[in-house]
Amino acid sequence: MSLAIVQTRVTVGIHSQAVTVEIHLANGLPAFNIVGLPEKAVQESRERVRAALNNCEFEFPTRRITVNLAPADLPKEGSGFDLPIAIGILAASEQIPLKALQNCEFIGELALSGDIRPVNGILPVALGTQNAGHQLIFPARNANEVTLVKDLTAYAAGSLLRVTAHLNKLHPIEALAYNPPKAEQALTVPDMSDVKGQPQARRALTIAAAGNHSLLMIGPPGSGKSMLAARLPGLLPELSEQQAIETAAIHSISDQSMQLSQWLQPPYRSPHHSASAAALVGGGSNPKPGEISLAHNGVLFLDELTEFQRSTLDVLREPLENGYIRISRVARKTEYPANFQLIAAMNPCPCGYLGDEKRACGTCTAEQIKRYQGRVSGPILDRIDLHVEVPNLPASQLMDNTAAESSASLKLQVLNCRKIQLSRTGSTNNTLNSKQIETYAMPDKHGLKLLQQAIDKLGLSARAWHRILRVSRTIADLENAEKVAARHVGEAIGYRRLDRLM
């Protein structure tokens, strides 16, 4: 029977979908056709497969070869179909046994010599194979990602000859063992003890870390905004194994290198202010994840916030609320997770020195300042929980060698605060819904009166009302206080600087 069926997978978002590769050899003029919505890279696999089989001294059938990729209505892209197509041709021509293909999936790009090259998106493929209860044969140079998947029987192969020797039981490949790397966060994240002064900014950063809140720092150039932001990952708890797998899967499909020794460390992304909207949220004819998805379960730092295009910043509105981004194109729709913590920094005016005690702002008019701050829309500011000033330090503080509180000490406070939140609602305070806010975050009568006065005076929205209450709950949790008091509400209101200015 000149028919073989091989199983493989194609990535769809951060997941993978099973694809059946059907190879049929028929009499007639020699031909090699691939059907089933193959894109350019898949069409080109005909030449790679032909050369690889010939150079490995297999017999290439001089018959009419038809390769069908099912389901036929799912677009197929990438070079990972080379190996399953080659294996299918060998099985259909009886050069390897058909029984060896049962409950086994294949993926890999073939070199003309028959070597197997690595492919992108191997982690979602491995997860899908594990859920299906199948075995996986994949490129050896993708082994570091596949070792992250539990309960998967996987075989790493460096060449087509090695795969056929395994299938023919001449030289079996040893199954890969589950071996996730250990985190090395302490060696890779800068420490808060390096930061001199800035007690209010350090406090705001601790609150942001404790409740997973978004934060905007406003201050003149050189005041330490970027330095503070870079130290936030050192305050955050390590990712759970499930979170780490999700984050690694996004990096796997996005052509982004990832240091697996740090895979439990929350990701930290800092795109340049010239980034486009598609670079932030993802896009393309075949949608790929953007910076907000690469920062999933971690931190997205936007330095020089006012230098971003306003339309670019506005695409962050829905992801900040929903925790995911849905990219729609004519050909397909893709959804990527985007549960990130937004940290941003900006100057107060075009010259950067508005309100600075060291260097007065004498060139910016009121209209210029208003126009400059207006580059960040109200709806975006409304979604940022904390606005804090970061002033330039006086010389006495710069020369002070007194050791500041370290990241390790602050991280203990954050971990204790997170433990309280998780035991109460199963999530961090930034995700409290309206009912949970009424149950757990409503202040006492003095705090409620203070909040009502702030709402009336500042004209805050209902969203800002909820965000102040969430921050108040986090401040109370840092003190291990059962009830939210007026002092907690007052501090939370103090972190709405731009609302006061506007």
Image (tube, rainbow, N blue to C red):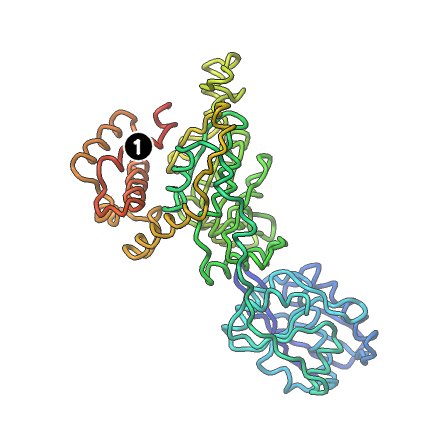
- Residue 397 shown left or right of residue 81 in the figure: left
| Residue 33 x, y percent position in the rendering | 73, 70
Q: Is residue 30 visible?
A: yes
Name the residue at the left extreme: 445
Kindly state the secondary structure of the residue where label 1 is placed.
helix
Q: Nearer the viewer, residue 287 or 156?
A: 156
Q: Which quadrant of the figure contains the C terminus? A: top left
Q: Is residue 488 above or below residue 182?
A: above
Three-letter residue code for mark 1: Ile
Residue 380 found in image quarter: top left
Q: Nearer the viewer, residue 243 or 490?
A: 490
Which residue corresponds to the image point at 80% horizontal and 78% vertical from the top-left? 60
Which residue corresponds to the image point at 28% horizontal and 36% vertical from the top-left? 465
Which residue corresponds to the image point at 51% horizontal and 46% vertical from the top-left? 292
Instruction: Tell me the residue that label 1 is attached to.
Output: 493
- Residue 208 shown left or right of residue 131 in the figure: left
